Amino acid sequence: MIAHEIDYNIYGEEMQYVEIELDPQEAVVAESGSFMMMDDGIKMDTIFGDGS
């Protein structure tokens, strides 16, 4: 997997969350249980391990 620069914003004070904007063909790896929501058109694949 090739790493690309991604656009993101961090919101909140005590309960922070990050909003990530993905361009076509970009991907993100997140910790299990940390995913909140996604827009239509985003495909999610789940894997076991560290994502490498």
Image (tube, helix red, strand yellow):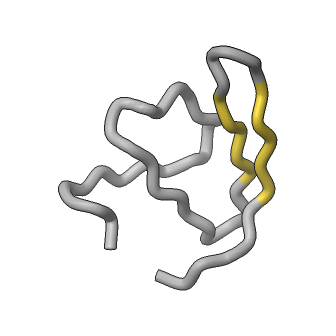
Q: Residue furthest top?
A: 14
Q: Is residue 34 left or right of residue 51?
A: right
Residue at image point 77% right, 49% down: 8
- Asked whether, in this view, residue 15 is left or right of residue 8, the answer is left
Residue 14 place in picture, x, y as percent: 67, 15
Q: In which quarter of the image is residue 5?
A: bottom right
Whether 34 is drawn above or below 21: the answer is: above
Instruction: Residue at 71%, 38% (x, y): give it.
Output: 19
Q: In which quarter of the image is the C terminus?
A: bottom left
Is residue 18 found left or right of 8 in the rendered image?
Answer: left
Q: Which of 40 and 21 is in front in this view?
A: 21
Relative to 12, is 33 on the left or the right? Answer: left
Query: Furthest residue to the front?
Result: 14
Rendered location of residue 15, percent (x, y): 63, 17
Residue 45: x percent and y percent? Answer: 35, 53
Q: Is residue 24 above or below residue 17?
A: below
| Residue 24 percent coordinates (x, y) | 69, 66
Q: Is residue 21 above or below residue 36?
A: below
Q: Residue at x 44, y 32 (%)?
A: 34
Q: Residue at x 46, y 56 (%)?
A: 29
How many marks overall?
Answer: 0
Residue placed farthest to the bottom in the image?
2
- Up/down of 2 relative to 42, above or below: below
| Front position in the image: 12 or 21 | 12
